[in-house]
Amino acid sequence: MIQAIALGLLAGLMIGNGIPHFVKGITREPYPTVFGSGPVPNLVAGWSGICLGALALLAADVPAAPAPGGAAVAVGVLLLGLFHAKGLAFGRE
């Protein structure tokens, strides 16, 4: 169960961070990353985050502990959503 919670939280954080970068990349809007704020770095950063989050989600084995694992994923996505919504992302004011 601890593995499902820890990896579920990591998956939620990675996916929650990957989605805004991916969206900014495909809409060609600038958004800061450590690799630059252009569309290509954002697309690659978002795609990488989503893929790594999916791998963490597979490793979490959420079906073995669906309630705590699913809650951890939801909390991870919520935390990163709040982080981006508050403007705390890298290079933002």
Image (tube, grey):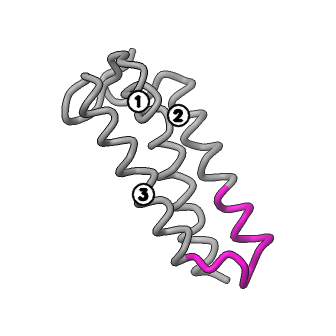
For numbered disc 2, what is the local secondary structure? helix
- How far across and how far down the image is residue 70, in percent? 72, 64
Residue plotted at (51% across, 29% down) = 84
Residue plotted at (47% across, 29% down) = 23
Q: How crowded is mark 2: few (under 14 residues within 10 Å), some or many (20 or more)?
A: some
44 to the left or right of 64: left
Q: Which of the marked residues, 2 or 3, is nearer the chain's N terminus?
A: 3
Give the residues in magenta: 60-73
Q: How crowded is mark 3: few (under 14 residues within 10 Å), some or many (20 or more)?
A: some
- How far across and how far down the image is residue 35, in percent? 19, 35
Viewer-proximal residue among 49 and 83 = 49
Any mark on residue 66, and which? none
* Mark 1 or 3, closer to the camera: 3
Asked if the magenta segment contains residue 6, the reply would be: no
Circles 2 and 3: CB distance less than 8 Å? Answer: no
- Quadrant of residue 44 in the image? top left
Residue plotted at (50% across, 62% down) = 54
Q: Which of the marked residues, 2 or 1, is nearer the chain's N terminus?
A: 2
Residue type pointed to by label 2: Phe
The quadrant of the picture occupied by the N terminus is bottom right
- Quadrant of residue 81 in the image? top right
Quickly name the residue at label 2: 83
Q: Which of the marked residues, 1 or 3, is nearer the chain's N terminus?
A: 3
Q: Main secondary structure of the magenta part?
A: helix
56 to the left or right of 72: left
Residue type pointed to by label 1: Ala
- Quadrant of residue 37 in the image? top left
Quickly name the residue at label 1: 89
Asked if the magenta segment contains residue 69, the reply would be: yes
For numbered disc 1, what is the local secondary structure? loop
